Image: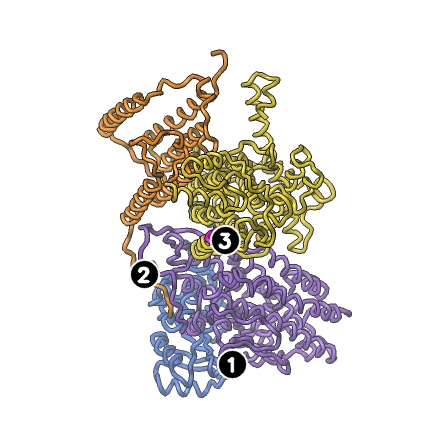
Amino acid sequence: MATVDDPRTIEFDVRTDEMLVNMGPQHPSTHGVLRLVLRTDGEVVSEITPHIGYLHRCAEKIGENLTPRQWIPYTDRMDYLAAMNMNLGWALTVEKLLKYGPPEKGRHLRVIISELGRIASHLVGMGAYGLDLGTFSPFLYAFREREKILDLFEEACGARLTYSYLTVGGATADLPPGWLQKCEAFLDELEPIVDEYHALLTTNAIFIKRTAGIGVMPQEMAIDFGTSGPVLRGSGVDHDLRRDGEETYTAMYDGYAFEVIVQKNGHYPKDHDYPAVPTEAVLGDCWHRFYVRMLELVQSIDLVRQAIDRYSRSEGSYGEPMKLNQKLPKGEVYLETEAPRGQMGFYIVSNGEAIPWRVRARSSSFCNLSVAPELCRSCLIADVPAIVGSLDIVMGEIDR
Amino acid sequence: MGAFFDQYLPTWLAYTLAGLIHVGLIINLVAVGALIFIWLERKISGRIQDRLGPTRVGGKFGWLQTLADGMKLLTKEDLMPEGADGFLFRIAPYVSFGASITAFIAIPFAGGDYPWIAQRVNTGVFFVIAVLGLEVFGVILAGYSSASKWSLFGAMREAAQVVSYEVPLGMCAVVPVLLAGSMDLVVIGDQQAGWFTNWFIFNDPATFITFWVYFTCATASVNRAPFDLAEAESELVAGFHTEYSGLRWSFFFMAEYGSMFSVSILASILFLGGWHGPIPIASLLHVDGTYFGNLLGCLNVLFKGTLGVAIMMWVRWTLPRLRIDQVMATCLKYCTPIAAVMFLGAALWQYALPGRNFFGLSRAPAAVYNVSEGWSAGANAAIEKSAPVETVNAESPTPVAVVLTQSNRGG
Amino acid sequence: MSGPSFVDQLKQKFGGLITGANLENIDPWIEVAPEGIVEVCTYLRDEPSLAFDYCNSVTAVDYLHIDEKKAAKSEWQPHLEVVYHLFSMQHKHSLVLKVIVPRWSGEPGVLPEVPSVAGVWSTADWHERECFDLIGVHFTGHPNLRRILCPEDWVGHPLRKDYEMPLEYHGIRGR
Amino acid sequence: MNQIYWPSVFFLIFGALACGFAVAVLLTANIVRMAFYLVLSLAATAGLFFLAGQDFVGAMQLLIYVGGTLVLLIFGVMLTSQERFVSMKTMAGDWLIGLGAGAALLFLLVIAATSVPNWRGRDAAEVQQMQVEKTAAPIAMGLLGARVDQINEPAQANIVRSGYLLHFEIVSIHLLVVLIGAAYLARAKRKPASVPTT
């Protein structure tokens, strides 16, 4: 239990009354069209109620009229900052239904692409979080590196944001020659830059003052509200689908050496000399969620390196995509994968035709956001963007 | 200036002409200053963020970028929100801009016998600090009258912050006044003549720390860098000037850069020897009192002011923003106590080692001490009249302490 | 996914409330009677050997054939299924629960009733609001049951098979 | 006098400004405008002080009064946060009482003012040679107890040579008491905010 005695208990105050303030939907720090109604008493926010649905396109209804491969572009638009991981989730769900495993080379290709997508998504998360706390420069440094990843993706599949590259059965095309060397060069270049990000934000005294001990989420609340990904691991829950997930998903990662980034009895896995955890930081606060994302970034660099040399050593086909109008077997399947923002679940019900009967996408940011009202109770107005920013939500994924 | 014109023109025309020239110079200084600083901010932020900043507008380094911005702002429509209080909404930017400009009346740009100053106010430091406190007035009116909750928040935050940071700012500004023995900025600047060792910042460790506390409080009182709560775009959309657009908005912008410039010039005069360069070129070339000497001095002051502004910009583009209660805490728990202790330290140091400079290592130049202060004649007269005592010489502690001790004994 | 052992354990504990199970499917599920869902869920969460403390998702599927030909051939009657996906953090195993309810309770237009499990897992609060909003299942006992994705005054439940897009909404042409 | 005597022109301007805005404070209904006019009228009096060559008192006036009124404005804004432009109408009866009291005070003021010996004003020449001490030092020294400006007068019985630090302290303590009283009046018993530390 995080016993933080809150310095802000107010015994004596000038008589002011409640004010309802609208933060959003057009607000610079709500990561897209999210509307938070703040009930404030002076600077102290007594309660926030999120209103979502501004970006709702009812992708699930469209899923009932398209074959699985035709629905891949819709999964791109859910978490548009990590589109490849969404494609992967949907592709694996359909493959689980078809009981079809992609060839070994296809699996390693998928690990390379999804981990690169995780790096790109965490870079955006870090930059946007710097913006929420008022410093502009980290955002530009993050996007400078992300541009290089987008160039790599553009070479691989031609698009920069919504790729539809990983599809049911494997990928739409193999990696172009010389791509692996460029990817390796990029990784060697990115490694030292991560330490710059730490110096710029993680160990910055004002950043620590703004995030340590703010929005503390104990483990029980994290599990009870169904949060996942860095938000869950930031509260110390040792759970990562790449290790504890279902067979079809963890098959991709078997044989890879990696440790789940979570604070176990006081310290994080030490495979990179990170800055120490500051004294004010309580497990489960905004600082830890940010710190887990930064460590995962370095972990993904290592994973991509392992995947590259496994991919180059394995031969055979990279996994041709499934035929378009292939009949789906009867039955229903649910599979969750570890997307950068949390566990992205896809649920497909089919009654034997080529078009599924019902499609459902369980979004991680949807559950992560449902914790926000609980965390923002009686914080200051300046803390609301800090807490909502630390949950790293994307509205496309929440509203589907 | 007025007397000079008086020889050729009727007196009333002479003095109005002199006044107009002064006002014209000051307005140009701030306007052109703002022009340069906005361009400088874009270039510095560009460099810090690994990009180029403006490069194409009007020539090689995009130096006309701000003019282009100005043109855009001029042509933009001046909106006013529907529920706004018209009169206050329109007048707020001009109150803020006016306050930030009037601070320049009492700021000298070159000292010596013919100081380049619009109006030599005897209590220069006190006047500048008082007027800087007025700038927050325009902000409050803007926040209140634009009828939107967000700007009200921004205005309240700014009011709380600036009003509370005036206290440590005033205390830090008092330390150089104590060293120089007068509040007149020209006198304070003159006391720091000679090598950089005579600058007040190096006078004693207490003043050294006071400079840094002063700079923090100055950054906070002009609402910049980690303390820019009022226009915190990530929380309050754009704070108090959310509803402003076009020319009115640019007045707020100019007011901010104007007061940033005036606060940095004040810092340079109080602590960094104002118009005296690190090496006393003017006195080495024996052009001390002449026009050329003053010109060198003026360049010195402008350079140091721009340096201060550049540092504020550099800090802004690296550090995240503080929360409102942390800003208040830094003011009450850190800046004010440190300023008080440093004030005590400076006073005791001055009492213990009266004639020393540069952390007590070098002797203060004798010339520094015959303070051309009218009152000391009166004080000396008082001393002779009340009780015959040895004359005030360079060795004895500063006149303040002398009279104090004398009058106690005498009274 | 040790399905069979769960079914026996639950049947032995709740008997009548467990109305069926399907173990051949890739993700086997257990069907629970609507009135017993809260009891079963609390037991599943608190029982140390099961410890399903993580609720992945609560969703619903509408089973109705629009054209008569398929309706005649289909082997099931039109009905609604509310699907619960659970997961246990300690034992790392998952389970699927289903609640079968008629498409409309009574005459068409009145939503079927299912007790809400928002009390058991707080995450179910938003999931059930989405189910209510998109498919139209009324969760009794839900703290704040109102639409979450569609606008407050939207008519109809989009993910129902027999749903038609409204002609216009506040002046915006629908069809 | 063919030549305009500028100091008196500015004196009239500042005087008119101060009194004009003071009256405006009475007439306006909107609390924020009232406070704004109050600030302008006090700024005009600061102008008067600068005109009289007393920079220190002028700057003091600017800092304390105009800054102080700023805090009053904030309080005014906070108290009226319910409807933004609360307007305080003065009924007819109040006008009568107000005018009566105002006239009485004005009459008293005029008598006191005219009893000052050199009220008729000094001609330009006499003003020129009056040596106005252009520094704040006499006030500062007076504050510390050494009345430097009364050095030349002979030591008469009624001229008290002590400084006016004591009066200054009394006024500031008084203001402090008023401030605490205002805060106490506006206090609200609020139970400590329920902060979930679970």
Give the farthest residue toward the right: A177
Q: Is residue B177 visible?
A: yes
Residue that label 3 marks: B352
Q: Colour of chain D?
A: orange
The residue that label 2 is drawn on is: D192
Amino acid found under the numbered disc labelled 3: Ala
Chain in purple (letter): A
Checking the image for residue C9, the label placed there is: none
Q: Amino acid at mark 1?
A: Asn
Supply the letter of whichever chain is yellow: B
Task: Determine which residue is flagged by label 1.
Answer: C25
Residue B205 or residue B35, whichever sits in front: B205
Q: CA distance from mark 3 to mark 1?
A: 92 Å
**Callout 1: chain:** C
- The number of callouts visible is 3
Name the quadrant containing residue A200.
bottom right
- Contact flag, marks 2 and 3 (Cβ < 8 Å): no
Region rendered in magenta: B342-350
- Residue A171, image quadrant: bottom right
